[in-house]
Image: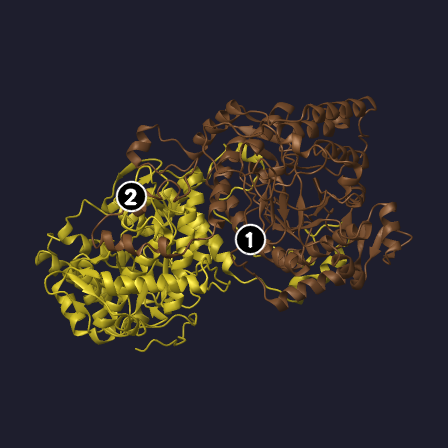
Chain colours: A brown, B yellow
Amino acid sequence: MADVNVPSAEGDSPSATPVGRRGRRARKGRENTARLIEQKPFRTRRNTYPKVDAVSVDELEMIHEASLKILEEIGIDFLNEEAKAILKASGADVDPSSDRVRLDRAIVMDAIGKAPSEFTMHARNPEKNLHFGGDSVVWSAVASAPNCVDADNGRRPGNREDFRNLLKLTQYFNIIDLNGGYPVEPVDIHPSVRHLDCLSDTARITDKVFHIYSLGKERNLDGMEIGRIVNGLSEEEFARTPVVLSIINSSSPLRLDTPMLQGIIEMSRRGQVIVLTPFTLAGAMAPVTLAGALAQQNAEALAGLAFAQMVNPGAPVVYGGFTSNVDMKSGAPAFGTPEYIKAALVGGQLARKYRIPYRSSAVCAANTVDAQAAYETVFSLWGAINGGGNYLKHAAGWLEGGLSAGFEKFIIDVDLLQMVDEYLQPMVVDEASLALDAIRDVGPGGHFFGTEHTQARYKDAFYSPIISDWRNYESWAEAGSPTAYEKANRLYKQVLAEFEMPPLDPAIDEELTAFVERRKEEGGAPTDF
Amino acid sequence: MADVNVPSAEGDSPSATPVGRRGRRARKGRENTARLIEQKPFRTRRNTYPKVDAVSVDELEMIHEASLKILEEIGIDFLNEEAKAILKASGADVDPSSDRVRLDRAIVMDAIGKAPSEFTMHARNPEKNLHFGGDSVVWSAVASAPNCVDADNGRRPGNREDFRNLLKLTQYFNIIDLNGGYPVEPVDIHPSVRHLDCLSDTARITDKVFHIYSLGKERNLDGMEIGRIVNGLSEEEFARTPVVLSIINSSSPLRLDTPMLQGIIEMSRRGQVIVLTPFTLAGAMAPVTLAGALAQQNAEALAGLAFAQMVNPGAPVVYGGFTSNVDMKSGAPAFGTPEYIKAALVGGQLARKYRIPYRSSAVCAANTVDAQAAYETVFSLWGAINGGGNYLKHAAGWLEGGLSAGFEKFIIDVDLLQMVDEYLQPMVVDEASLALDAIRDVGPGGHFFGTEHTQARYKDAFYSPIISDWRNYESWAEAGSPTAYEKANRLYKQVLAEFEMPPLDPAIDEELTAFVERRKEEGGAPTDF
């Protein structure tokens, strides 16, 4: 089925597109029951604010030029023979005695020009389809943390229960648009079958778009198959319907390793989404100067993105920016710093130059949910929103530079995202909102609480936070002086208690079970990656 | 002495302007000794990022039009006879039977056109002179809190010791540009002489520009005299040298009361700075719709600013925006909300339209120094910086919607301001920073830590925070798992222990003492305001 909007008989929103043979069936009975925590429905959001440039057009051109020179003169190591063959066939200068590949600017820019500027990703619940690119903004929760933490049980390596609980938070909150990866790595599942258990959990507990890891060809293929099954697509439909995405990190500086290249090959070949994100920490894997780190980020991103277009011209891709700085005393990575914000802005400028959707993040280096966790996260959001980020990853629950997924942090971040979502709603300026009659009626020295103008609007006039405590000091102290952290602790447990699984077509459920069982019988995926 | 830059023999920065007969003397011996807390020197900062508009040019015009209609058709209550006489003489329609004054748009816009777009404020230490307007950004700490709070002593009404300690923090940190008012109200000093004690404390403990309250004509006159004395100015020099500023809040909706109007009259008459800030809480003292609240904010601001120009054409003024929303369940004011950010952006658009420096704030509603305190404050900064705020008030230590000044919050905010200051430093993009040679030398798979390019730059490459803890979890846990709040607690005490009074010319000190003693003998200021 083509990527067009088909209003359905059930009165779906215009963005809901029934996809494939089981799309309509799967949507039955998915209405939310009344929930204790008030939240806005799942909705699309656009960032119509002007984007903020951190460098001039000329300076941007200098960064662009430097990255092209890196690709032409220094080159990138592509650690995979199949990839090198594809590159060679596309005219790249492939060194036969090493993994080094040099890419002429014409080849790079020609390939980049084939990437779509915007595309739609499909979820098994078509109301949760997502638009990537343009002014659209979508975000996903923390991904790939080895540990998780909450106030009651402390910090521990991830397990399947924690994994599932974090998925429940992801599903519960309408403000989280998609699954950006395993919120925590469940180390109690054997690596050979972990992707099967995790992705079938993801596909059942959530009805949103999801991520699959590029950790070897088999995992990509299994993940895509699970995406195909739960979206009810034929092989043919799948190849023209993006339903899964995979983050591809270059091994900075200037390398793409085998699992990542296999990921691009398998995913792009089938029209699935690649998010190419170099992890260029200035002072460590990239130059200590931001301009240099960004030139390197851009070179690595362009190399991977161009390669995806060589695999399959027109394959949907996202430009990922993740340049930050390290603490030069210890080498520890830092996030949400002034340097991070600037890099996020320039990343956006580059992505817009290439007309490719832009991925940024909402991250911090804090070890607990204190003021630091909050200010670093909001500074990251500042960079992502001002920079025109289309996809914000790690936007709920990220702690410790990604080494831990926090349950309380997740809830506080949901409040932050809901606030940013509200900030992105354009201000209404018209006769009614200018309120001249109300101002006239109230007059000097009056009060607006009781006016008709206020009464007609007060319920929805302002964002109503789930964490922020606006009580006066006395009421707050009487209530036990709860911090944001303590309120979040209560709230996440309440969500888990309230949680209901989203409906899943029994036939799809069965097909999913059969696939996972078969693949487990076959031994899953190799673990020697 | 004219407002020009006179490089001095001592090698001052170009912004340092020796002012008046005692300027040069006062600067001797003021070099800081080595301090335990590393910080950048006092420096000017500019916000060269593009400003972010929240409404279109047409929508801005609608808000502007609505505020002119308010002034023409509804009018403002000016609760002071002297003010009404000045307004009448300037052609305003003054109702003889009430306090209502209606202002024709031609009169308003003509007066507004006389306000300077930029001006310099002078401090007793000329290195701390400040530029207002254009791209300049200056900020001051929390002001006017009735209470203060720290982790050791809890929350209590302000006293002189707390007042002085907060002034010491203000002076100590170079990132705080000026004194924006009493950081906490010292209620142990009798109101009749409080301004004399507080302002002489301010003038001695800090060598920065300071604020005086408009709480009756006598206090304005006393405050200006203290400003004149410590800046070593003759009466004549004083009238052309802005050294003190005063916040004028309208009594929203649509009223200016006697102390505020007297403040404008006395301050503007002598060329001192008025910051006209309506406190328009949407849903309470202003319409529940942001557009309406902003139209009202703008009407009140224009009325006061135009009045200042009627008193003395060309008097330096600042356009203050402080529109936020209330919690519609309780009526409690909220800060750092999505609505607050939008209002801050539009306030900036209006101030730029009138070419008047713009005042915003960094505020929160949190009752303690938790994640909420941090995220609301950073959201406020987001609005202020994106909105092009030239003067940010309450930018360190503000808690509880202004009801409390927090010692730990002060330190955390200093870190935030230092980060924003770093964000405002333009990124360098040139051959050296693009680092192509370093990238070539390191090559694929290498590391930048040891390179010459890194070694030559690593010390100053990135902002080094005073609060943020970037240690890994294990080291942090071993150190006792300190939160930002706990680190700030230690740090503020360290600053107070380290504090040294800035040098003050003994003759000025004597003159100040004599003035305060004389005014106390005269009984200070009336307390029946």
Judged from this view, the residue extending furthest toward the front is A9
Q: Is residue A190 visible?
A: no
Badge 1 is on which residue? Answer: A341
Q: Amino acid at mark 2?
A: Leu
Q: Say which chain tag 2 marks.
A: B
Mark 2, secondary structure of its residue: loop
As rendered, which of B498 and B406 lies closer to the eye? B406
Count of marks, rendered view = 2
B193 vs A61: above or below: above
Q: For residue A211, which quarter of the picture?
A: top right
Q: Say which chain tag 1 marks.
A: A
Which residue occupies 71% across, 24% down?
A: A507
- Estimate the spatial distance between the alpha carbons at disc 1 and disc 2, rounded to whole Å: 32 Å
Residue A422 lies left or right of residue A112; in this view the side is left
Assess disc 2: are there few (<14), some (14-19) or many (≥20) residues with their C-alpha within 10 Å of its C-alpha: many
What label does residue B403 carry, if any? 2
Judged from this view, the residue extending furthest toward the right is A96
Which residue occupies 49% across, 46% down?
A: A420
B69 vs A461: above or below: below
Mark 1, secondary structure of its residue: helix
Residue A447 horizontal/vertical position (percent): 24, 48
Quarter of the picture holding the N terminus of chain B: bottom left
Q: For residue B254, which quarter of the picture?
A: bottom left
Assess disc 1: are there few (<14), some (14-19) or many (≥20) residues with their C-alpha within 10 Å of its C-alpha: many
Q: Is residue A514 visible?
A: yes
As rendered, which of B58 and A359 lies closer to the eye? B58
Residue A276 horizontal/vertical position (percent): 71, 48
